[in-house]
Image: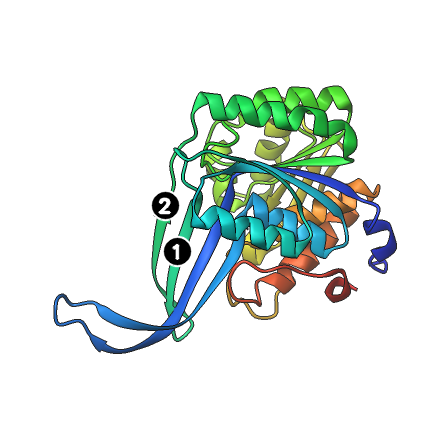
Amino acid sequence: MKTFPKDAATRARVLVVGDVMLDRYWFGDVERISPEAPVPVVHVARREDRLGGAANVARNAVALGAKVTLVGLVGVDEAATRVHELLTEAGVTAHLIADAAHPTTLKMRVLARQQQMMRIDFEEKPTAQLLDTLQAQVAPLFAEHDVVVFSDYAKGALAHVEALITLARLQGIAILVDPKGTDYQRYRGATLVTPNRGEMQQAVGHWTSETDLAERAQGLRDQLELEALLVTRSEQGMTLFTANGSDHVDAQAHEVFDVSGAGDTVLATLAVMRAIGVDWPEAMRWANRAGGIVVGKLGTSTVTAGELA
């Protein structure tokens, strides 16, 4: 591979739209079982908050040197305050729409001895009025960026993604989508869609061979009018499908410690590479390298340009 284009990456302008979340970690030790129920008692010694979902995609793109704008939904609560603080620290320009009736999506994880004991989620679907406000915020931003990333975690911010894709296409910018669910028709007209192995199986069914996968993937790509379809396949690496056929790269992780947020890192790397004009096969290889690095870290983390270089 070529040397990572650090200088070019600083000229990338990336817009991220989607489900903004806060990942909260409580770290502690377990030394006894509760007398109230047969569950471990975790004595919390340390707490840590990290950006999740679309916000994690944004901070990953910033870590690679890009100029990044984030649009999403939050509540009027302590979690929203932390999201704003962390975005400011990361260097992300945030356009977050706050609504007291819509709590910030929060994933709270309790860990002991580097093992996740429990996860507690706080989330609610946004109203139609909130979605209209989000679209109004996003529309004028397309013209100011090289690429837009739609980070869909099925929390509701991208319930009207079809309209957003239409607006982005009118501006002629690249559109990258991290999909969710089984209705991929919602993403018709995007430039690139990046399902993981499980999401791809939800979309096209279980394949029986690499040839079968290629046929199903190319069928989906044609159906959705995509320029490219990238299937991330965990320990099996990544496979890219374009009009030129398929291209594959093996996984590079030496030790897998935590896969949470790895898809965000991959998506952010693809977005930055596309914004500076790198073709899809090379962008996939940089994304694969970045993903291989981030799974060796605990929790939702980033990969810097220096690490890739």
Pointer 1 or 2: first along the chain = 1
**Eyeballing the image, is 186 above or below 302?**
above
Q: Residue at x 72, y 28 (%)?
A: 142
Q: Position of residue 267 (x, y in %)?
A: 64, 46
**Eyeballing the image, is 144 above or below 22?**
above
Q: Position of residue 19 (x, y in %)?
A: 52, 39
Rendered image: mark on residue 261: none
Contact between labelled residues 2 and 1, with CB atoms less than 8 Å apart = yes
Does residue 249 show up?
Answer: no
Q: Quadrant of the C terminus?
A: bottom right
Q: Quadrant of the N terminus?
A: bottom right
Residue nearest the observer in this picture, 304 or 182: 304
Does residue 258 show up?
Answer: yes
Q: Position of residue 280 (x, y in %)?
A: 76, 42
Q: Residue at x 70, y 56 (%)?
A: 63
Whether residue 126 sits left or right of residue 224 in the image: it is left
Residue 26 is drawn in which quadrant?
bottom left
- Looking at the image, what colour scheme do you see? rainbow
The residue labelled by disc 1 is 108
Residue 76 is drawn in which quadrant?
top left
Element at badge 1?
Answer: strand
Whether residue 256 sits left or right of residue 78 in the image: it is right
Residue nearest the observer in this picture, 223 or 142: 142
The crowd level at tag 1 (other Cα within 10 Å; few <14, some 14-19, many 20+) is: some
Q: Residue furthest bottom?
A: 31
Q: Residue at x 37, y 73 (%)?
A: 28
Element at badge 2?
Answer: strand
The residue labelled by disc 2 is 122
Query: Disc 2 residue type?
Result: Phe
Query: Disc 1 residue type?
Result: Met
Residue nearest the observer in this picture, 271 or 218: 271
